[in-house]
């Protein structure tokens, strides 16, 4: 594939968690490899993540949600702070984006779930490729009042119309019947013609990974032992409560298991910390190596982790952030597909977790289902499909 020579692409992934940046970086790296120039605009931990790959990045004014001690989004606090914090923060981010786009002069803006970038590009008449897996997200509410119904309806209407300003909408998900984010993809017909389902964006395929034996040996995994990979990602406020729950549990796991847990800290270093059967690693440089080496994955219900685990044919135990509609929906779809089981964070203890892992690894049905799904050639190559989409818009 060629065609990026001399092009300038402005990448603007959402900075909440690392999922948006992690699926955008491989696209940018390929653009650069093919002679294009890129500039990233993101915020929070995603800035450090992008820097680790040597890509140019500017730190945008942050926008974030309020969380309670369990890691759940505090809807009441977020709703009322939105009037005083989110709107001014959005306007500051919009001003920042317009200023930097004018300076960089991109041919295309590539937004990953960033509304401010779409409006800035629209104002400057720059074509936009939008990457997202939630067109109309579900908003968790304990209160069911006329005010909140009106407020939620208003937010979703604004979001839908904002996404629709993009020239092309790329959905990094599997085609039906294997679409993970099905609950969140209620896309109007007027937008549907601009939507492309491309598959999972992965720079490294399972067949390309040759370090399985080396990884298992480095973690001390014997031939009669299973390796469980806990990739606990997401914003710090969401992942920290689960890490605190899992760490003492993993230390007391049966001897037939070796546990490796990624803490998802970009600047935390890569030195492994061994404690009994548990190995903690602040930052894993190549998570695909661990996906390939493990026997089972434990994670939040992040879209990218679920997609990658399916592609690597690894069964999952999903522990969603409490009251997080997207992760609950993702977990439900993964269970419906027969590739995962899920549990509430409040129910996580040593006994329940060991029993679930034992049952899943003793049963061959999860592996069989994963092999069946991956035998379908229609799952797509998200990286190639996204690059093709950018090129088509670039040369339109």
Image (cartoon, rainbow, N blue to C red):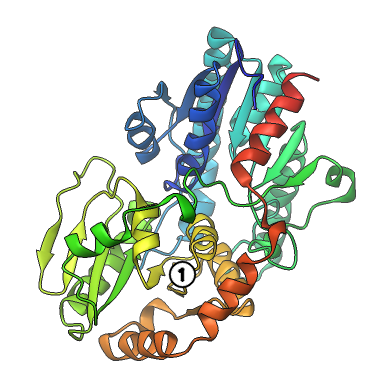
Question: What residue does disc 1 label?
Answer: 314
Relative side of 290 to 310, left or right = left
Q: Which residue corresponds to the image point at 47% horizontal and 56% vertical from the top-left?
A: 206
Give residue 130's position: percent from left, percent from top.
Answer: 67, 37
| Neighbour tally class for label 1: few under 14, some 14-19, many 20 plus, Cα within 10 Å | many
Q: Compared to 212, does 54 lie above or below?
A: above
Q: Which residue corresponds to the image point at 28% horizontal and 62% vertical from the top-left?
A: 213
Q: Is residue 69 visible?
A: no
Q: Compared to 273, does 163 lie above or below?
A: above
Q: Secondary structure at mark 1?
A: loop
Q: Is residue 230 visible?
A: yes
Relative side of 50 to 382, left or right = left
Q: Compared to 43, does 10 lie above or below?
A: above
Q: Quadrant of residue 6?
A: top right
Q: Which residue corresponds to the image point at 43% horizontal and 29% vertical from the top-left?
A: 61
Q: Which residue corresponds to the image point at 24% horizontal and 71% vertical from the top-left?
A: 259
Q: Quadrant of the C terminus?
A: top right
Relative side of 317 to 151, left or right = left
Q: Quadrant of residue 298?
A: bottom left
Total numbered badges shown on the rendered structure: 1
Q: Compared to 25, does 366 lie above or below?
A: below
Give residue 225's position: percent from left, percent from top.
Answer: 24, 79
Q: Quadrant of the N terminus?
A: top right
Give residue 265's position: percent from left, percent from top.
Answer: 27, 47
Front residue of this view, candidates 335 and 296: 296
Give residue 390's position: percent from left, percent from top.
Answer: 68, 29
């Amino acid at each position: 594939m060629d065609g990026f020579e001399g092009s300038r692409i402005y990448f603007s992934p959402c900075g909440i968690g690392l999922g948006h940046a992690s699926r955008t970086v491989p696209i940018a790296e390929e653009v650069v490899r093919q002679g294009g120039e890129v500039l990233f605009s993101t915020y929070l931990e995603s800035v450090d993540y992008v820097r680790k790959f040597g890509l140019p990045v500017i730190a945008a004014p942050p926008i974030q949600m309020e969380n309670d001690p369990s890691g759940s989004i505090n809807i009441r606090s977020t709703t009322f702070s939105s009037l005083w914090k989110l709107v001014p923060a959005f306007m500051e981010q919009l001003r920042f984006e317009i200023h930097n786009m004018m300076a960089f002069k991109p041919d295309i803006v590539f937004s990953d779930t960033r509304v401010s970038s779409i409006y800035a590009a629209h104002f400057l008449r720059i074509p936009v490729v939008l990457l997202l897996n939630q067109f109309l997200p579900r908003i968790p509410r304990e209160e069911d009042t006329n005010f909140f119904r009106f407020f939620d309806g208003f937010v979703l209407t604004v979001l839908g119309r904002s996404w629709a300003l993009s020239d092309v909408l790329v959905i990094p998900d599997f085609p039906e019947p294997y679409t993970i984010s099905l609950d969140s993809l209620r896309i109007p017909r007027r937008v549907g013609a601009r939507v492309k389902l491309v598959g999972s964006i992965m720079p490294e395929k399972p067949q390309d990974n040759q370090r399985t034996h080396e990884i298992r040996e480095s973690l001390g995994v014997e031939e009669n032992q299973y390796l469980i990979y806990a990739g606990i990602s997401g914003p710090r406020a969401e992942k920290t409560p689960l890490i605190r729950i899992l760490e003492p549990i993993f230390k007391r796991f049966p001897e037939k298991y070796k546990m490796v847990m990624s803490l998802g800290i970009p600047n935390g270093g890569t030195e492994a910390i061994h404690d009994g059967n548990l190995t903690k690693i602040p930052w894993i440089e190549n998570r695909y190596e661990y996906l390939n080496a493990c026997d089972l994955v434990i994670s939040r219900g992040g879209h990218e982790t679920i997609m990658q685990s399916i592609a690597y044919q690894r069964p999952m135990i999903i522990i969603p952030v409490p009251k997080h509609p997207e992760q609950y929906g993702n977990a439900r779809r993964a269970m419906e597909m027969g590739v995962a089981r899920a549990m509430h964070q409040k129910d996580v203890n040593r006994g329940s977790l060991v029993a679930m892992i034992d049952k899943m690894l003793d049963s061959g049905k999860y592996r069989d289902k994963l092999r069946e799904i991956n035998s379908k050639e229609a799952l797509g190559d998200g990286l190639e499909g996204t690059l093709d989409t950018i090129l088509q818009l670039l040369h339109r």
